[in-house]
Amino acid sequence: MVLQRLFRAVIMGPPGSGKGTVSGRIAKTFGLEHISSGDILRANINAKTELGLLMKASIDQGQLVPDHVISRLILRDLKAIPQSSWLLDGFPRTVTQAEALDDAYSVDTVINLNVPFHTIKERLTSRWTHLPSGRVYNVDFNPPKEPGRDDVTGEPLVQRDDDTPETVTRRLKAYETQTEPVLEYYRSKGILETFSGTETNKIWPHVEAFLHKKLSVVNKGVA
Ligand code: AP5
Ligand code: MG
């Protein structure tokens, strides 16, 4: 689908709800730029930047990084792509971050993946990630073509340091206390669209149909 005006979306959901997986499909199908706060932070950690080194401890412990740090990072990246339609994954994660985003851009839609916590705990321990691109695999659900290697580059896959059972529990707690209020924030603005389920492959067709409809309205709006 070719977009005739810029479209700005956010994808939300607890850690491991499939945001990265669904975002990859949305980016491919609709041509939106996928911006993942977690991928950006992990790239900084990997490159041993000053910011990455400062943030590594909180991330490994399953805590959120400070609002002003992540807001500055994401808003700077968005400013660099003024002519692109985008999908934000992992940001905003607090009401303060949502307000910072609102001050700079108007968000068209927020996709919320509602997946039960017990499903999530099982998944994260079998996830493998290609750190440079953020592509994710799961040994049971979407295994790479060659075990332990990224399908596109052939480079090695790794397990994230924050995917241990104790850290996943802490990340889910942070989600409940700090991120759930953001859902209410967007619900009250009338732009929250929730998709519930336990399997990404079953949730995806609904997200895809919703976006097809939404984007055809966006296109008609300028015709
Ligand atoms: P971030 O990288 O954003 O992590 P997250 O929100 O915890 O989410 P994940 O990336 O773990 O999961 P996902 O929903 O993308 O799911 P995925 O598609 O991989 O953030 C990491 C950390 O950075 C945070 O904890 C925080 O410290 C910091 N941070 C980031 N943004 C921040 C912000 N804005 N403010 C402050 N701090 C911030 O899927 C999960 C797995 O499930 C995969 O293996 C997938 O293949 C598998 N899967 C999907 N569907 C199925 C299925 N049906 N059956 C089996 N497996 C499945
Ligand atoms: Mg992710």
Image: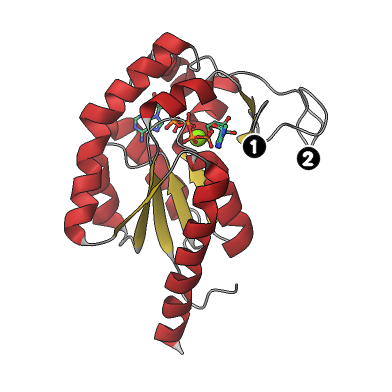
Between 101 and 17, the one lying in front of the other is 17
The single residue placed furthest to the left in the displayed view is 188
Tell me if I can see residue 40 in this picture: no
Give the CA distance from mark 2 to mark 1.
10 Å
Tell me the residue that label 1 is attached to: 133
Residue 148 horizontal/vertical position (percent) = 76, 22
Give left or right: position of 77 versus 156: left
Kind of residue at disc 2: Val
> Looking at the rendered structure, which numbered label has been put on residue 186?
none
Location of residue 104 by image quarter: bottom left
Tell me if mark 1 has few (under 14), some (14-19) or many (20+) residues whose alpha carbon lies within 10 angstroms of its own: few
Residue drawn at point x = 59 percent, y = 74 percent: 2
Kind of residue at disc 1: Ser
Give left or right: position of 211 versus 71: right
Looking at the image, tell me whether mark 2 or mark 1 is earlier in sequence order: 1
Tell me the residue that label 2 is attached to: 152
Between 16 and 117, the one lying in front of the other is 117
The single residue placed furthest to the bottom in the displayed view is 223
Residue 131 horizontal/vertical position (percent) = 63, 28
Residue drawn at point x = 64 percent, y = 24 percent: 128
Please determine whether, in this image, residue 59 is positioned above or below residue 39: above
Please determine whether, in this image, residue 156 is positioned above or below residue 82: above
Callouts 2 and 1 close, C-beta under 8 Å: yes
Label 1: state its secondary structure. loop
Label 2: state its secondary structure. loop
Residue drawn at point x = 19 percent, y = 39 percent: 181
